[in-house]
Structure formats: C-alpha cells, structure tokens
Image: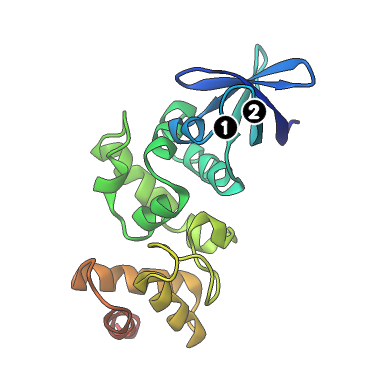
Amino acid sequence: MIGKLKGVVDTVAEDHLILDVHGVGYLVHCSARTLRDLPRTGEAASLVIETHVREDMIRLYGFGSEAERDWFRLLLTVQGIGSKIALAVLSTLRPSELAQAVTLADKTMIARAQGVGPRVATRIVTELKDKVPGGGLSADMGLPAIAGDAAIVGEGGPVADAISALVNLGYGLPQANTAVAGAMRAAGEAATTETLIRLGLKELAK
C-alpha cells in the first residue's frame, strides 16, 4: 500500500493532481484546500497518501498532513459519508476547525461544506463526538492531549487552555472536552479561560 509520495507537481485539476514520481504519473484525489496549498507546477511536493483498493480500481487520496488524512478516515466511518463528502468537509474546514466543530457540536459550521446538509452534519457530530477525544488520536488533529499542545481554537486559545487546566486537575480528556463544550454553549465564544474553567467545573459537578 502507498502511504506517502514525493515527486513533482505535473498537473492540477479541480479535484485531483498528477504527481510525477521518477517518471510515473500518480493521479491523486485531494481536497480543494490541499490543492490550493500545493507548490506550483514543476515544483517538488510531498503528500500523505490513503490508498483504497477495489476489485476494479485503485484510488489514491492525498493530504498535506497526517492530521488531514486521519480526519478523512474518521469521516468515512460516519454512516452515509463517502470520499466525496469527506473531501468536501476537509475542503471547507481545517483539521483544528473540524475538531472544534465536532467537540462543540457545531453542526452549522460543518454544514458549510458543499453537499453537507443539516442531517449529514448532525450524523458527523453525533457519530464522531465520542470517537475523537477517546480514540487515542494525536493533538495534531486539533485536540489537546496535555497542557501546551495545539489548541482547538487557535494555538493557546481559551478553549484549549481550559481543557488543559481540567486535565491537569485530574479529569480525563473526554470529560474535560465535554465540560468545556458545555461551558462554551453557556458563556459564548468570547468567554475567557477563567470563565470556561469555572463553568466547566460546574458541568463536571452535575
């Protein structure tokens, strides 16, 4: 199985590119965001690859980071979500933004993706909310595992700081995520770290 490709950008289309690796052109499907971030035609590029093998075809999906690839895999576990919708979500939301949306059950944010309506967005939030925090996934996916890791809302943001504080107090990451999500709903997006910690502790005490 192909896990990574390094080569030269040959051709870029609407939903894929051809990557020239030592004279062999690999057709790789990507999100619009990954395609936008590619170097120019003729320049070197490296992509993390997800290989799907069927009886009648082999299809390669390319990502700019392992975090994006991991979210692609997670999205495909949601009922009714195929590669096209998964790539549409990743075209609209960065891994950290998707982590935020799932953690805070922000269906509206996910529904911004092309082809994703309210029902699909609800399924994504419902089916992934427990998988992400407790699934042993890295902080690169936008979920802080310990204090100081990447924030859910920007590096060092109030949400991540509040979650880290609750984890340092001895609460598990899934519990801390859920508590701060509830605090965010109560206090709003402008809430400070101190407010989120205080409200989060109240959520944990329920």
Q: Residue at x 33, y 79 (%)?
A: 193
Which secondary structure lies at badge 2? Answer: loop
- Residue 17 appears in the picture as rendered: yes
- Other-residue count near label 2 (Cα within 10 Å), few / some / many at <14 / 14–19 / ≥20: few
- Quadrant location, the C terminus: bottom left
The residue sitting at the top extreme is 56
Q: Is residue 169 above or below residue 81?
A: below
Which secondary structure lies at badge 1? Answer: loop
Type of the residue with mark 1: Pro
Q: State the colouring used for the structure image.
A: rainbow
Give 13 or 202, whichever is nearer the viewer.
Answer: 13
Classify residue 78 as left or right of residue 65. left
Please state the horizontal and vertical placement of residue 185, each as a whole percent of the image.
Answer: 22, 67
Classify residue 144 as left or right of residue 187. right
Please state the horizontal and vertical placement of residue 106, each as a whole percent of the image.
Answer: 28, 53
Q: Is residue 101 above or below residue 20?
A: below
Type of the residue with mark 2: Glu
Q: Residue at x 38, y 70 (%)?
A: 157
Q: Which residue is mark 1?
A: 39
| Separation of residues labelled 1 and 2 (CA atoms) | 6 Å
The quadrant in which residue 50 appears is top right
Give 127 or 43, whichever is nearer the viewer.
Answer: 43
Q: Which residue is mark 2?
A: 43
- Quadrant location, the N terminus: top right
Please state the horizontal and vertical placement of residue 171, each as a whole percent of the image.
Answer: 48, 81
**Cβ–Cβ below 8 Å for labels 1 and 2?**
yes
Q: Residue at x 49, y 72 (%)?
A: 173
Please state the horizontal and vertical placement of residue 165, each as a whole percent of the image.
Answer: 44, 82
